[in-house]
Image (cartoon, grey):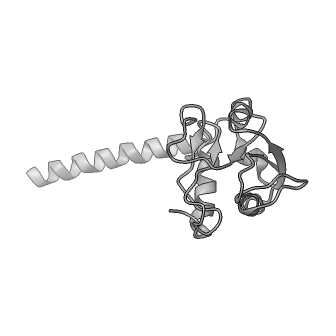
Amino acid sequence: MHVKMVDRARLLRAGIVAALVLALTGCGISIPSDPQGTLDRATGEELRIGLAIEPGLSEGGAPPTGPLVDLANEYATSIDARPEWEIGGEETLIEMLEQEQIDIAFGNFSEDSPWSDRAALSRPFTADGGGAGMIVALMPLGENALVSSFERFVDDTGRAQ
């Protein structure tokens, strides 16, 4: 008799969980999500990339060059987007992220970034085969689908830590 009650409780909990999942799916909620729709907007269109010039990683120019630029171009291609470049210093790029003027920022940013309260940080990756060490990309806070997409890209290309 005790076994049947435990099984019923388990079935009831499983049914409640299944109902919640179906209800949330019906509401159009997807996880991870981008409240501002950054990944959806950029996919197939334009990825607005902020770039801090960093010797050995990125050089200015039209278009810019270097291993970070190559990585950013590859990521844009992976989401079928055209890269649109904005060059600036770290603080300028953070402000541009907050004002939704760029979608992602690259530079010599580390896990210990002082910007972590103003931008989402990706997992560490290498842009140049590891010679310059591990860095992170910065994205708008809350744009978790974009962060997940970028992290899958660095995982798939063998650049993740």
- Pick the residue in front: 135 or 81: 135
Q: Can you see residue 68? A: yes
Q: Whole-percent x and y of residue 13?
A: 30, 45
Q: Whole-percent x and y of residue 160?
A: 54, 63
Q: Residue furthest right?
A: 62
- Side of 67 where 133 appears, left or right: left
Residue 71 lies in quadrant: bottom right
Q: Whole-percent x and y of residue 92?
A: 73, 33
- Pick the residue in front: 41 or 154: 154
Q: Whole-percent x and y of residue 98?
A: 69, 31
- Pick the residue in front: 13 or 153: 153
User: For the image shown, how many numbered marks are present on the structure?
Assistant: 0
Judge whether 135 appears above or below 104 on screen: below
Q: Residue furthest front?
A: 55
Judge whether 127 appears above or below 105 on screen: below
- Pick the residue in front: 128 or 38: 128
- Side of 13 where 91 appears, left or right: right
Q: Can you see residue 45? A: no
Judge whether 56 appears above or below 9 on screen: below
Q: Residue furthest left?
A: 1
Residue at (79, 60) in percent of width and height:
80
Residue at (71, 42) in percent of width and height:
38
Judge whether 2 appears above or below 29 on screen: below
